[in-house]
């Protein structure tokens, strides 16, 4: 039997988030006969508390639970409801994997295809010794690639800020 961890990165754009969830659900169906357990690491907080009361992680769980009725595997959920960006997502993932990573046969990170290059940089900087497999959802918005080109320039600074925030390092 196989134990897998599916790390699902949040997104505040609902259509993109649901596309990522769809991509993540395809992983478990690929293993239907072999899976012992699926663990979901749902990573995403509340971006704007003045407009939202539910974290991206909680929204992901709701969407997955609506489709879970077709799945007979045992699913467990780990929630990161604090992360505000991809650097913070990977800090939280790294903390979890340092304690629990050995129990998994495979670790998948699910994000959007347009977000892969930046997400991979974060993963490499934050947890360089962790082997992950990537699952990429195809949907993008008309300006997704444009914004990725802007944000990718800030990866190192974003990592520094996330480390300061979570490890209180100055």
Image (tube, rainbow, N blue to C red):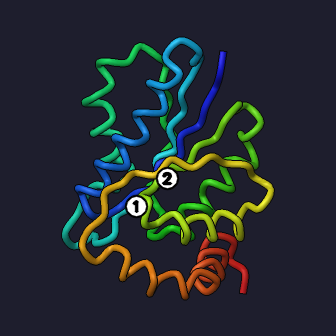
Q: Is residue 145 left or right of residue 152?
A: left
Q: Quadrant of residue 94?
A: bottom right
Q: Residues within 10 Å of mark 2 (few under 14, many from 20)?
A: many
Q: Quadrant of residue 127?
A: bottom right
Residue 164 has which mark?
none
Q: Is residue 164 above or below residue 90?
A: below
Q: Earlier in the sequence, mark 1 or mark 2?
A: 1
Most extreme residue toward the left is 51
Q: Is residue 149 left or right of residue 162?
A: left
Q: Is residue 85 left or right of residue 59?
A: right
Q: Quadrant of the C terminus?
A: bottom right
Q: Is residue 15 above or below residue 103?
A: below
Which residue is painted at 37% across and 76% down in the image?
Answer: 145
Which residue is painted at 65% across and 82% down in the image?
Answer: 160
Residue placed most toward the observer, 48 or 117: 117
Q: Is residue 167 left or right of residue 146?
A: right
Q: Which percent across, then down, holds residue 91?
A: 63, 63
**Residue behind mark 2:** 80
Mark 2 secondary-structure assignment: strand
Q: Is residue 118 above or below residue 19?
A: below
Look at the numbered discs 1 and 2 and tell me whether their residues touch, using CB distance below 8 Å: yes
Q: Is residue 101 above or below residue 142?
A: above
Which residue is painted at 33% across and 70% down in the image?
Answer: 47
Q: Quadrant of residue 105?
A: top right
**Residue behind mark 1:** 45
Q: Quadrant of the N terminus?
A: top right
Mark 1 secondary-structure assignment: loop
Which residue is painted at 60% across and 58% down in the image?
Answer: 92
Q: Which percent across, then down, holds residue 152?
A: 52, 81
Query: What's the CA distance linking mark 1 and mark 2?
Result: 7 Å
């Amino acid at each position: 039997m196989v134990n897998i961890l599916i790390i699902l990165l949040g997104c505040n754009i609902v259509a993109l988030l649901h596309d990522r969830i769809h991509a993540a659900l395809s992983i478990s169906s690929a293993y239907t006969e072999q899976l012992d357990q699926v663990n979901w690491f749902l990573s995403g907080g509340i971006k704007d508390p003045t407009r939202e009361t539910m974290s991206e992680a909680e929204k992901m769980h709701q969407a997955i639970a609506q489709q879970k009725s077709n799945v007979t595997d045992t699913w467990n959920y780990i929630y990161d409801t604090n992360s505000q960006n991809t650097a913070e997502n990977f800090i939280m993932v790294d903390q979890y994997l340092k304690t629990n990573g050995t129990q998994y046969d495979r670790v998948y990170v699910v994000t959007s295809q347009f977000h892969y290059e930046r997400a991979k940089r974060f993963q490499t900087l934050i947890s360089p010794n962790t082997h992950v497999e990537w699952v990429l959802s195809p949907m993008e918005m008309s300006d997704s690639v444009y914004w990725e080109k802007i944000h990718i320039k800030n990866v190192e600074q974003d990592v520094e800020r996330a480390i300061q925030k979570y490890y209180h390092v100055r």
